[in-house]
Image (cartoon, helix red, strand yellow):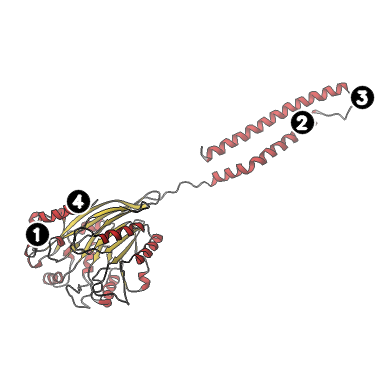
Amino acid sequence: MDRREKYILKKRKKQMRQRLIIACAALLAFIVIIILCVKSCVRSDDEAPKETTLADVIDVLKDRTRAEEQTQEGKSEASETSETEDFETVPESTTVEPAEVNLIAYGDNLIHIDFSRRAMETYGDYVFDSLYRNIISDVKTADVAVINQEVPVAAPELDISNYPRFNAPSTIIDAVYNVGFDVITMATNHTLDQGANGLRISLNYIRDNFPGILTTGAYLTEEERNTIPIREVNGIRIAFLNYTYGSNCGWSSSVYVNRMTEELMAVDIELAKAQADYIVVCTHWGEENQTLANYDQMSMAAFLCEKGVDLIIGTHPHVVQQVNMVTSTTGHQTLIYYSLGNLISMQNTTESMLGGVAKVKIVRDPDGTVRTDSYDYDFVVTQWGVNYKDPHVIPWSAYTKELSLQHGMPGYDSTFSYERLQKIIDNVRYYSD
Protein backbone atom coordinates (compact mmCIF):
# COMPACT_ATOMS: atom_id res chain seq x y z
CA MET A 1 0.00 0.00 0.00
CA ASP A 2 1.52 3.35 -1.00
CA ARG A 3 1.34 6.61 0.96
CA ARG A 4 -1.65 7.95 -1.01
CA GLU A 5 -3.75 4.86 -0.20
CA LYS A 6 -2.75 5.01 3.50
CA TYR A 7 -3.77 8.66 3.68
CA ILE A 8 -7.22 8.03 2.13
CA LEU A 9 -7.83 5.00 4.39
CA LYS A 10 -7.00 7.00 7.54
CA LYS A 11 -9.35 9.79 6.47
CA ARG A 12 -12.23 7.28 6.03
CA LYS A 13 -11.56 5.77 9.47
CA LYS A 14 -11.77 9.24 11.03
CA GLN A 15 -15.17 9.89 9.40
CA MET A 16 -16.55 6.51 10.59
CA ARG A 17 -15.32 7.22 14.13
CA GLN A 18 -17.14 10.58 14.17
CA ARG A 19 -20.38 8.94 12.98
CA LEU A 20 -20.10 6.25 15.67
CA ILE A 21 -19.61 8.89 18.38
CA ILE A 22 -22.73 10.77 17.24
CA ALA A 23 -24.78 7.54 17.26
CA CYS A 24 -23.57 6.68 20.75
CA ALA A 25 -24.42 10.19 21.93
CA ALA A 26 -27.96 9.88 20.64
CA LEU A 27 -28.42 6.52 22.40
CA LEU A 28 -27.01 7.92 25.63
CA ALA A 29 -29.39 10.90 25.44
CA PHE A 30 -32.35 8.55 25.12
CA ILE A 31 -31.23 6.52 28.17
CA VAL A 32 -30.72 9.64 30.30
CA ILE A 33 -34.18 10.89 29.44
CA ILE A 34 -35.72 7.59 30.53
CA ILE A 35 -33.81 7.64 33.83
CA LEU A 36 -34.84 11.24 34.56
CA CYS A 37 -38.47 10.42 33.91
CA VAL A 38 -38.40 7.46 36.32
CA LYS A 39 -36.68 9.51 39.08
CA SER A 40 -39.20 12.32 38.76
CA CYS A 41 -42.01 9.88 39.43
CA VAL A 42 -40.67 8.57 42.76
CA ARG A 43 -39.42 11.89 44.24
CA SER A 44 -41.51 13.95 46.62
CA ASP A 45 -42.43 17.47 45.65
CA ASP A 46 -39.95 19.05 48.04
CA GLU A 47 -37.18 16.92 46.75
CA ALA A 48 -37.81 17.76 43.13
CA PRO A 49 -34.72 19.27 41.59
CA LYS A 50 -34.63 22.10 39.16
CA GLU A 51 -36.32 21.02 35.98
CA THR A 52 -33.92 19.52 33.46
CA THR A 53 -35.00 19.87 29.90
CA LEU A 54 -34.16 17.74 26.90
CA ALA A 55 -32.19 20.71 25.52
CA ASP A 56 -30.00 20.69 28.65
CA VAL A 57 -29.24 17.00 28.18
CA ILE A 58 -28.43 17.45 24.54
CA ASP A 59 -26.07 20.37 25.38
CA VAL A 60 -24.22 18.23 27.90
CA LEU A 61 -23.94 15.38 25.45
CA LYS A 62 -22.66 17.75 22.77
CA ASP A 63 -19.94 18.99 25.14
CA ARG A 64 -18.91 15.44 25.98
CA THR A 65 -18.90 14.40 22.34
CA ARG A 66 -16.83 17.42 21.38
CA ALA A 67 -14.30 16.73 24.14
CA GLU A 68 -14.01 13.09 23.15
CA GLU A 69 -13.48 14.00 19.49
CA GLN A 70 -10.78 16.49 20.44
CA THR A 71 -9.06 13.84 22.53
CA GLN A 72 -9.17 11.30 19.71
CA GLU A 73 -7.98 13.89 17.19
CA GLY A 74 -5.16 14.93 19.48
CA LYS A 75 -3.86 11.34 19.61
CA SER A 76 -3.78 10.93 15.86
CA GLU A 77 -3.11 14.50 14.76
CA ALA A 78 0.66 14.21 14.80
CA SER A 79 0.77 10.97 12.82
CA GLU A 80 -1.90 12.12 10.36
CA THR A 81 -0.20 15.46 9.82
CA SER A 82 3.13 13.75 9.35
CA GLU A 83 1.78 11.29 6.83
CA THR A 84 -0.12 14.05 5.02
CA GLU A 85 3.01 16.15 4.79
CA ASP A 86 5.03 13.14 3.68
CA PHE A 87 2.49 12.42 1.02
CA GLU A 88 2.40 15.99 -0.19
CA THR A 89 6.20 16.29 -0.32
CA VAL A 90 6.95 12.92 -1.91
CA PRO A 91 9.03 13.88 -4.96
CA GLU A 92 8.07 12.46 -8.27
CA SER A 93 10.61 10.09 -9.82
CA THR A 94 13.30 12.18 -11.53
CA THR A 95 14.44 11.25 -15.02
CA VAL A 96 16.79 12.89 -17.48
CA GLU A 97 16.71 13.05 -21.22
CA PRO A 98 18.51 10.02 -22.72
CA ALA A 99 21.46 10.86 -24.95
CA GLU A 100 24.19 9.13 -26.90
CA VAL A 101 27.63 9.93 -28.28
CA ASN A 102 29.36 8.05 -31.06
CA LEU A 103 33.10 8.29 -30.50
CA ILE A 104 35.74 7.32 -33.04
CA ALA A 105 39.49 7.19 -32.39
CA TYR A 106 42.53 6.56 -34.59
CA GLY A 107 46.15 5.78 -33.76
CA ASP A 108 49.45 7.53 -34.40
CA ASN A 109 49.56 10.37 -36.90
CA LEU A 110 53.21 9.57 -37.60
CA ILE A 111 54.41 12.15 -40.15
CA HIS A 112 57.73 11.11 -41.65
CA ILE A 113 59.71 13.57 -43.73
CA ASP A 114 58.68 11.93 -47.01
CA PHE A 115 55.08 13.04 -46.44
CA SER A 116 56.34 16.62 -46.61
CA ARG A 117 58.45 15.92 -49.70
CA ARG A 118 55.56 14.32 -51.58
CA ALA A 119 53.24 17.20 -50.64
CA MET A 120 55.71 19.78 -51.92
CA GLU A 121 56.21 17.83 -55.16
CA THR A 122 52.48 17.44 -55.75
CA TYR A 123 51.06 20.75 -54.54
CA GLY A 124 54.04 23.06 -54.28
CA ASP A 125 53.23 23.52 -50.61
CA TYR A 126 52.81 21.56 -47.42
CA VAL A 127 49.23 20.50 -48.05
CA PHE A 128 48.17 17.21 -46.47
CA ASP A 129 44.41 16.89 -46.93
CA SER A 130 44.80 14.05 -49.43
CA LEU A 131 46.26 11.81 -46.71
CA TYR A 132 42.85 11.47 -45.06
CA ARG A 133 40.51 11.75 -48.03
CA ASN A 134 39.05 8.26 -47.62
CA ILE A 135 38.15 8.54 -43.93
CA ILE A 136 36.38 11.91 -44.03
CA SER A 137 32.89 10.41 -43.97
CA ASP A 138 33.67 8.17 -40.97
CA VAL A 139 35.27 10.99 -39.00
CA LYS A 140 32.58 13.56 -39.73
CA THR A 141 29.77 11.10 -39.02
CA ALA A 142 31.05 10.56 -35.46
CA ASP A 143 30.02 12.93 -32.67
CA VAL A 144 33.59 13.18 -31.44
CA ALA A 145 36.78 12.07 -33.21
CA VAL A 146 40.19 11.53 -31.57
CA ILE A 147 43.66 11.34 -33.13
CA ASN A 148 47.12 10.90 -31.60
CA GLN A 149 49.62 13.48 -32.88
CA GLU A 150 52.83 11.48 -32.59
CA VAL A 151 55.35 14.20 -33.50
CA PRO A 152 55.81 17.97 -33.08
CA VAL A 153 54.35 20.25 -35.77
CA ALA A 154 56.73 23.20 -35.40
CA ALA A 155 57.87 23.79 -39.02
CA PRO A 156 58.60 26.18 -40.67
CA GLU A 157 59.72 27.97 -37.47
CA LEU A 158 61.94 24.95 -36.83
CA ASP A 159 63.37 22.78 -39.59
CA ILE A 160 61.48 19.71 -40.80
CA SER A 161 63.21 16.59 -39.57
CA ASN A 162 62.85 12.82 -39.49
CA TYR A 163 63.56 10.10 -36.94
CA PRO A 164 64.93 10.14 -34.29
CA ARG A 165 63.98 13.79 -33.61
CA PHE A 166 60.85 14.43 -35.62
CA ASN A 167 59.37 17.71 -36.73
CA ALA A 168 56.52 18.15 -39.23
CA PRO A 169 54.92 21.23 -40.83
CA SER A 170 52.25 22.91 -38.72
CA THR A 171 49.86 22.64 -41.66
CA ILE A 172 49.39 18.95 -40.90
CA ILE A 173 46.93 20.25 -38.29
CA ASP A 174 44.99 22.05 -41.04
CA ALA A 175 44.31 18.68 -42.64
CA VAL A 176 43.48 17.09 -39.27
CA TYR A 177 40.94 19.85 -38.68
CA ASN A 178 39.50 19.68 -42.20
CA VAL A 179 38.85 15.96 -41.95
CA GLY A 180 36.86 16.58 -38.77
CA PHE A 181 38.97 15.63 -35.75
CA ASP A 182 37.89 17.23 -32.46
CA VAL A 183 40.46 15.96 -29.94
CA ILE A 184 44.23 15.68 -30.38
CA THR A 185 46.31 13.74 -27.86
CA MET A 186 49.79 15.25 -27.55
CA ALA A 187 51.67 13.22 -24.91
CA THR A 188 54.04 10.85 -26.72
CA ASN A 189 57.69 9.84 -26.47
CA HIS A 190 58.35 12.30 -29.34
CA THR A 191 56.50 15.32 -27.89
CA LEU A 192 59.74 17.03 -26.86
CA ASP A 193 61.80 16.03 -29.92
CA GLN A 194 62.17 19.76 -30.65
CA GLY A 195 62.42 20.75 -27.01
CA ALA A 196 60.12 23.04 -25.09
CA ASN A 197 60.10 25.57 -27.94
CA GLY A 198 58.88 22.96 -30.41
CA LEU A 199 55.97 22.13 -28.12
CA ARG A 200 55.13 25.81 -27.66
CA ILE A 201 55.04 26.39 -31.41
CA SER A 202 52.90 23.29 -31.94
CA LEU A 203 50.34 24.11 -29.27
CA ASN A 204 50.13 27.79 -30.14
CA TYR A 205 49.52 26.99 -33.80
CA ILE A 206 46.59 24.75 -32.88
CA ARG A 207 45.11 27.22 -30.41
CA ASP A 208 45.54 30.27 -32.61
CA ASN A 209 44.09 28.68 -35.73
CA PHE A 210 41.73 25.98 -34.46
CA PRO A 211 40.43 26.93 -31.01
CA GLY A 212 37.62 24.40 -31.35
CA ILE A 213 40.09 21.50 -31.17
CA LEU A 214 40.69 20.12 -27.69
CA THR A 215 44.33 19.20 -26.98
CA THR A 216 45.35 17.03 -24.06
CA GLY A 217 48.50 15.55 -22.52
CA ALA A 218 50.86 18.51 -23.12
CA TYR A 219 50.57 22.04 -21.75
CA LEU A 220 52.35 25.38 -21.64
CA THR A 221 51.60 26.28 -18.01
CA GLU A 222 50.99 24.52 -14.73
CA GLU A 223 47.51 26.02 -14.59
CA GLU A 224 46.67 24.41 -17.94
CA ARG A 225 48.06 21.10 -16.77
CA ASN A 226 45.86 21.16 -13.69
CA THR A 227 42.73 21.83 -15.74
CA ILE A 228 40.85 18.70 -16.79
CA PRO A 229 40.30 18.67 -20.60
CA ILE A 230 36.58 18.13 -21.10
CA ARG A 231 34.47 18.15 -24.23
CA GLU A 232 30.69 18.25 -23.89
CA VAL A 233 28.96 16.30 -26.63
CA ASN A 234 25.16 15.98 -26.84
CA GLY A 235 24.92 17.01 -23.19
CA ILE A 236 27.43 14.38 -22.00
CA ARG A 237 30.67 15.71 -20.49
CA ILE A 238 33.64 13.57 -21.55
CA ALA A 239 37.06 14.01 -19.94
CA PHE A 240 40.09 13.22 -22.13
CA LEU A 241 43.22 12.49 -20.12
CA ASN A 242 46.51 11.63 -21.86
CA TYR A 243 49.83 10.26 -20.59
CA THR A 244 53.09 8.90 -22.02
CA TYR A 245 55.39 6.25 -20.58
CA GLY A 246 58.47 8.36 -21.39
CA SER A 247 60.19 11.01 -23.48
CA ASN A 248 63.01 10.28 -25.95
CA CYS A 249 64.58 13.69 -25.41
CA GLY A 250 64.11 14.03 -21.68
CA TRP A 251 61.67 16.25 -19.83
CA SER A 252 61.32 20.01 -19.62
CA SER A 253 60.85 22.25 -16.61
CA SER A 254 59.25 25.06 -18.63
CA VAL A 255 56.44 23.10 -20.33
CA TYR A 256 54.36 20.18 -19.12
CA VAL A 257 54.00 16.72 -20.64
CA ASN A 258 51.99 14.17 -18.67
CA ARG A 259 54.06 11.25 -17.43
CA MET A 260 52.25 7.99 -16.90
CA THR A 261 52.52 7.61 -13.13
CA GLU A 262 49.86 6.15 -10.88
CA GLU A 263 50.10 9.12 -8.52
CA LEU A 264 49.44 11.72 -11.21
CA MET A 265 46.72 9.74 -12.93
CA ALA A 266 44.91 9.02 -9.66
CA VAL A 267 44.69 12.74 -8.83
CA ASP A 268 43.54 13.66 -12.34
CA ILE A 269 40.92 10.93 -12.41
CA GLU A 270 39.39 12.08 -9.13
CA LEU A 271 39.21 15.64 -10.46
CA ALA A 272 37.64 14.34 -13.67
CA LYS A 273 35.01 12.39 -11.75
CA ALA A 274 33.82 15.61 -10.13
CA GLN A 275 33.47 17.40 -13.47
CA ALA A 276 32.70 14.83 -16.16
CA ASP A 277 30.19 12.07 -16.85
CA TYR A 278 32.59 9.76 -18.71
CA ILE A 279 36.39 9.43 -18.49
CA VAL A 280 38.67 8.52 -21.39
CA VAL A 281 42.37 7.92 -20.71
CA CYS A 282 44.66 7.91 -23.74
CA THR A 283 47.81 5.96 -22.91
CA HIS A 284 51.07 6.07 -24.86
CA TRP A 285 52.51 2.78 -23.64
CA GLY A 286 53.60 -0.75 -24.49
CA GLU A 287 56.35 -2.28 -26.58
CA GLU A 288 56.88 -1.35 -30.21
CA ASN A 289 55.97 -3.90 -32.92
CA GLN A 290 54.33 -6.32 -30.46
CA THR A 291 50.86 -7.41 -31.57
CA LEU A 292 49.72 -8.41 -28.06
CA ALA A 293 49.56 -6.21 -24.98
CA ASN A 294 52.24 -6.96 -22.38
CA TYR A 295 52.02 -7.37 -18.62
CA ASP A 296 52.77 -3.71 -17.87
CA GLN A 297 49.93 -2.55 -20.10
CA MET A 298 47.49 -4.99 -18.52
CA SER A 299 48.60 -4.05 -15.03
CA MET A 300 48.16 -0.34 -15.71
CA ALA A 301 44.79 -1.01 -17.33
CA ALA A 302 43.66 -2.84 -14.19
CA PHE A 303 44.75 0.13 -12.07
CA LEU A 304 42.82 2.58 -14.26
CA CYS A 305 39.77 0.33 -14.15
CA GLU A 306 39.84 0.29 -10.33
CA LYS A 307 40.02 4.08 -10.37
CA GLY A 308 36.82 4.28 -12.42
CA VAL A 309 38.05 5.06 -15.94
CA ASP A 310 35.47 4.19 -18.61
CA LEU A 311 37.58 3.93 -21.77
CA ILE A 312 41.31 3.45 -22.45
CA ILE A 313 42.75 4.21 -25.89
CA GLY A 314 46.30 2.99 -26.32
CA THR A 315 48.99 4.07 -28.78
CA HIS A 316 52.77 3.77 -29.31
CA PRO A 317 53.46 0.13 -30.39
CA HIS A 318 52.81 1.18 -34.06
CA VAL A 319 50.88 -2.07 -34.55
CA VAL A 320 47.35 -3.05 -33.58
CA GLN A 321 46.63 -4.96 -30.39
CA GLN A 322 43.54 -6.52 -28.86
CA VAL A 323 40.52 -4.81 -27.32
CA ASN A 324 39.16 -6.13 -24.01
CA MET A 325 36.51 -5.23 -21.45
CA VAL A 326 37.71 -5.60 -17.85
CA THR A 327 35.78 -5.37 -14.59
CA SER A 328 36.99 -3.89 -11.30
CA THR A 329 36.53 -5.41 -7.84
CA THR A 330 33.51 -3.09 -7.41
CA GLY A 331 31.93 -4.12 -10.70
CA HIS A 332 32.98 -1.08 -12.75
CA GLN A 333 33.72 -1.91 -16.39
CA THR A 334 36.49 -0.39 -18.50
CA LEU A 335 36.85 -0.82 -22.26
CA ILE A 336 40.49 -1.05 -23.40
CA TYR A 337 41.94 -0.68 -26.87
CA TYR A 338 45.52 -1.63 -26.03
CA SER A 339 46.98 -0.19 -29.24
CA LEU A 340 45.45 1.37 -32.33
CA GLY A 341 48.76 1.22 -34.17
CA ASN A 342 49.40 3.88 -36.83
CA LEU A 343 46.76 5.92 -38.53
CA ILE A 344 49.35 6.76 -41.16
CA SER A 345 53.13 6.35 -41.42
CA MET A 346 56.01 5.47 -43.70
CA GLN A 347 57.41 2.74 -41.53
CA ASN A 348 58.67 -0.30 -43.40
CA THR A 349 56.89 -3.34 -41.98
CA THR A 350 53.61 -4.96 -42.97
CA GLU A 351 52.25 -4.73 -39.41
CA SER A 352 52.88 -0.97 -39.26
CA MET A 353 50.70 -0.40 -42.36
CA LEU A 354 47.61 -1.61 -40.49
CA GLY A 355 45.88 0.75 -38.08
CA GLY A 356 43.00 0.26 -35.66
CA VAL A 357 39.82 2.31 -35.39
CA ALA A 358 37.98 2.43 -32.07
CA LYS A 359 34.23 2.93 -32.42
CA VAL A 360 32.43 3.40 -29.13
CA LYS A 361 28.82 4.26 -28.38
CA ILE A 362 28.37 6.14 -25.10
CA VAL A 363 24.84 6.54 -23.71
CA ARG A 364 23.08 8.35 -20.90
CA ASP A 365 20.19 6.34 -19.47
CA PRO A 366 16.95 7.92 -18.15
CA ASP A 367 18.27 7.55 -14.58
CA GLY A 368 21.31 9.67 -15.47
CA THR A 369 23.84 6.84 -15.70
CA VAL A 370 26.45 7.38 -18.43
CA ARG A 371 28.08 4.21 -19.72
CA THR A 372 29.63 2.38 -22.67
CA ASP A 373 26.73 0.89 -24.59
CA SER A 374 28.53 -0.89 -27.43
CA TYR A 375 31.81 -0.89 -29.29
CA ASP A 376 33.49 -2.08 -32.46
CA TYR A 377 37.02 -2.49 -33.78
CA ASP A 378 37.67 -1.49 -37.37
CA PHE A 379 40.88 -1.10 -39.35
CA VAL A 380 42.60 1.12 -41.92
CA VAL A 381 45.57 0.60 -44.22
CA THR A 382 48.28 3.15 -45.04
CA GLN A 383 48.63 2.99 -48.81
CA TRP A 384 51.45 4.44 -50.90
CA GLY A 385 53.16 3.51 -54.14
CA VAL A 386 56.76 3.21 -55.21
CA ASN A 387 58.94 5.91 -53.60
CA TYR A 388 56.07 6.77 -51.26
CA LYS A 389 53.97 8.20 -54.05
CA ASP A 390 50.42 9.40 -53.15
CA PRO A 391 50.31 8.34 -49.48
CA HIS A 392 46.81 8.04 -48.01
CA VAL A 393 44.64 6.02 -45.66
CA ILE A 394 42.06 3.47 -46.85
CA PRO A 395 39.41 1.83 -44.62
CA TRP A 396 39.83 -1.94 -44.49
CA SER A 397 36.26 -2.37 -45.73
CA ALA A 398 37.31 -0.67 -48.99
CA TYR A 399 40.69 -2.33 -49.29
CA THR A 400 41.21 -5.01 -51.96
CA LYS A 401 43.81 -7.48 -53.13
CA GLU A 402 44.32 -5.34 -56.22
CA LEU A 403 45.21 -2.33 -54.06
CA SER A 404 47.66 -4.43 -52.05
CA LEU A 405 49.46 -5.34 -55.28
CA GLN A 406 49.95 -1.62 -55.99
CA HIS A 407 51.51 -0.94 -52.60
CA GLY A 408 55.15 0.12 -52.40
CA MET A 409 55.74 -1.94 -49.25
CA PRO A 410 57.03 -5.13 -50.96
CA GLY A 411 60.19 -3.17 -51.75
CA TYR A 412 60.83 -3.07 -47.98
CA ASP A 413 58.92 -6.09 -46.64
CA SER A 414 58.45 -8.96 -49.08
CA THR A 415 55.81 -10.54 -46.81
CA PHE A 416 53.35 -7.73 -47.45
CA SER A 417 50.07 -8.96 -48.94
CA TYR A 418 46.33 -8.67 -48.54
CA GLU A 419 46.26 -12.13 -46.96
CA ARG A 420 48.93 -11.16 -44.45
CA LEU A 421 46.97 -8.10 -43.38
CA GLN A 422 43.84 -10.23 -42.99
CA LYS A 423 45.77 -12.70 -40.83
CA ILE A 424 46.91 -9.89 -38.52
CA ILE A 425 43.31 -8.71 -38.15
CA ASP A 426 42.11 -12.25 -37.44
CA ASN A 427 44.78 -12.65 -34.77
CA VAL A 428 43.81 -9.39 -33.05
CA ARG A 429 40.14 -10.32 -33.10
CA TYR A 430 40.96 -13.75 -31.67
CA TYR A 431 42.50 -12.18 -28.58
CA SER A 432 39.79 -9.55 -28.25
CA ASP A 433 36.49 -9.79 -26.39
Q: Residue at x 8, y 59 (%)?
A: 415
In 3D space, how far apart are the residues under numbered discs 2 and 4 (Cα atoms)? 95 Å
Give the number of the disc on residue 416.
1
Q: Amino acid at mark 2?
A: Ile
- Numbered disc in front, either 4 or 3: 4
Q: Nearer the viewer, mark 2 or mark 4?
A: 4
- Determine whether the residue tagged by mark 1 lies in a helix, strand or loop: loop
What number is the disc on residue 45? 3
Q: Amino acid at mark 1?
A: Phe
Mark nearer the N terminus (4 vs 1): 1
* C-alpha span from label 4 to label 3: 118 Å
Q: Horizontal placement of 314 versus 90: left or right?
A: left
Which amino acid type corresponds to the residue marked 4 in the rendered image? Tyr
Residue 430: mark in rendering:
4
Q: Earlier in the sequence, mark 2 or mark 3?
A: 3
Number of numbered discs on residues = 4
Disc 3 marks a residue whose amino acid type is Asp
Residue 421's place in the image compared with 253, above or below, is: above
